[in-house]
Image: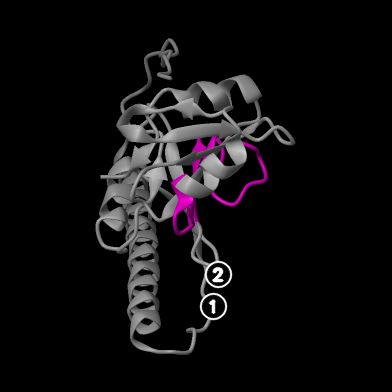
Amino acid sequence: MSETLKDDTQQAEPKPTAAPERGKELLQQRFVRGGAIGVLLVLVAVVVWIVVNNTSSSQSSPPPATTTGPVALSANGLRTIAGVVGQPIYWAGPKRGYLYELTRTENGSVFVRYLPRGVNAGSRKRELTIATYRYPKALQALKNVSHGREHTLPGGGIALVDTRTPKSIHIAYPYVGYQVNVFDPSATRAQRVAFSGSVRPVS
């Protein structure tokens, strides 16, 4: 899954003058400010996520529906969020050169889409996506419809290829009230990822 970076041949450039140097400094300052704003927005979304989850556990009526993302994160950024949201977020592990688009829907489902270089968060490009759905007794529910077609995973989990949409593979583990779905535009790649044992909670 790693990518090889090819360095272009660089030509000698004239020594920069003071004006271009000042321009670079201003550009870097703007870039840093933009990055800080992006991080702030992510943190605000996480706080809203936590507040909504805490509210739903203390009230009998459901909280207002909220959506988080899509937002592109580094692997470390994804780990930071996964450590505070109070529910598992599954992925297939880090992939060199990729960012990870996080989206949480109104019903609490979480999607992690792998973004290669040049693909921005929110684009329509279909990429490897790992979805996490709240699903009580997910393992037994999946066994009930597998009819012996399941693939055994490390840790007692099972994976089942959706015969109607073979690019989607359902995964469930013992004592985990969530079902995981692995999607890839290539059915072969989707199955390879799902059966590899690499699909696990972000940690």
Looking at the rendered image, the quarter that the C terminus falls into is: top left
Q: Residue at x 59, y 52 (%)?
A: 122
**Counting residues from the N terminus, which is met first, the one under dot 1 or under dot 2?**
1
Residue position for label 2: 106
Image-based side of 179 in relation to 16, left or right: right
Residue 130 disc label: none
Q: Amino acid at mark 1?
A: Ala
- Residue 124 in the magenta stretch? The answer is yes
Residue 10, given in percent of the width and then of the height, sits at: 40, 14
* Rendered image coloring scheme: one colour
Q: Amino acid at mark 2?
A: Glu
Residue 113, given in percent of the width and then of the height, sits at: 51, 43
- Residue 56 in the magenta stretch? The answer is no
Q: Residues within 10 Å of mark 1 (few under 14, many from 20)?
A: few
Image-based side of 16 in relation to 121, left or right: left
Residue position for label 1: 65
Query: In the figure, 4 relative to 110: above or below?
Result: above
Of residues 122 and 144, the one drawn nearer to the viewer in this rendering: 144
Q: Residue at x 40, y 45 (%)?
A: 90
Gap between marks 1 and 2 measured at Cα: 5 Å
Range of the magenta residues? Answer: 110-139
Query: In the figure, 78 relative to 86: above or below?
Result: above
Is the Cβ of the residue at disc 1 closer than 8 Å to that at disc 2?
A: yes
SS of the residue under disc 2: loop
Residue 108, given in percent of the width and then of the height, sits at: 49, 65
Residue 33, given in percent of the width and then of the height, sits at: 34, 60
Q: Residue furthest right?
A: 164
Tell me where residue 164 sits by quadrant.
top right
Q: In this rendering, does residue 141 appear at all?
A: yes
Q: Residue at x 40, y 78 (%)?
A: 52
Tell me where residue 106 sits by quadrant.
bottom right
Q: In this rendering, does residue 117 appear at all?
A: no
